[in-house]
Image: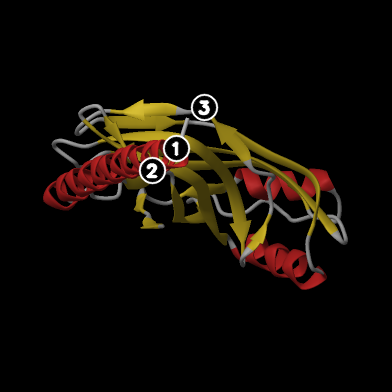
Amino acid sequence: MSKEKHHKHEHHLRRCCGGFAACLLALVLIVGFISLVVYLALRPTKPSFFLQDLQLRSIDLGDPSLSATAQVTLASRNPNDHVGIFYRRLDVFVTYRDEPVTVPVSLPPLYQGHRDVTIWSPVLSGESVPVAAYVADAMKQDIAAGYVALQVKVDGRVKWKVGTWVSGSYHLFVSCPAMLAAGPGGMAPLGGGPNGTRGAVAALKFTQPAGCTVGT
């Protein structure tokens, strides 16, 4: 092959490769633009979460650690008419004064359709969860006074689904206030050991369902 033919062949090959790359780039841009238009037109709304119940079954206020068992009933609603939600990961735990008092429990992944409602009732526990000394002292005082303000928190990842299109993964963080208070029977004595603590905890009841703040 002569040098002239070789250069022509090489030039033709470069033009073909350049044209293919340009077509591929244009296709990617078109698909991305259509996805963006669909996303902006439908405006996916974050799911709503509601704390329906929290039962604090037991708590051992050791020093410098804490062991607790609680069952929460948590509801989630998809407010969108045309957008589904994939819950890829949801970790639920309880905090007191911004300190975790149970270890995170992972809920099973699921898909939530348009306007659907999902309810979970996981049991949360934590053996020897390390906490600051002032946190244990503050909880003892609150229990003795007949009320405890907790927070049920959810940390997870979600995806939006519109038709066959599925978005990337987004962070989801939920915080639900949970107020526990003594009933008409008052409080049991708060002894120095676990048995006295559990007796006092048994008198604390969840006051009312609460809406949750949802962030990303």
* Horizontal and vertical percent position of residue 100: 67, 56
Q: Which residue is mark 1?
A: 6
Of residues 210 and 36, the one drawn nearer to the viewer in this rendering: 36
* Badge 1 density bin: few <14, some 14–19, many ≥20, Cα 10 Å: few
Dot 3 amino acid type: Pro
Residue at the image position 49 percent from the left and 50 percent from the top: 183
Tell us which disc is closer to us: 1 or 3: 1
Q: Is residue 30 found left or right of 58 in the rendered image?
A: left
* Horizontal and vertical percent position of residue 122: 55, 32
Dot 1 amino acid type: His
Q: Which residue is mark 3?
A: 108
* Horizontal and vertical percent position of residue 108: 52, 27
Q: CA distance from mark 1 to mark 2?
A: 12 Å
Q: Earlier in the sequence, mark 1 or mark 3?
A: 1
Dot 2 amino acid type: Arg
Q: Which residue is mark 2?
A: 14
Label pair 2/3, CB-CB below 8 angstroms: no
Residue lying at the far bottom of the rendered structure:
134
Residue at the image position 34 percent from the left and 42 percent from the top: 21
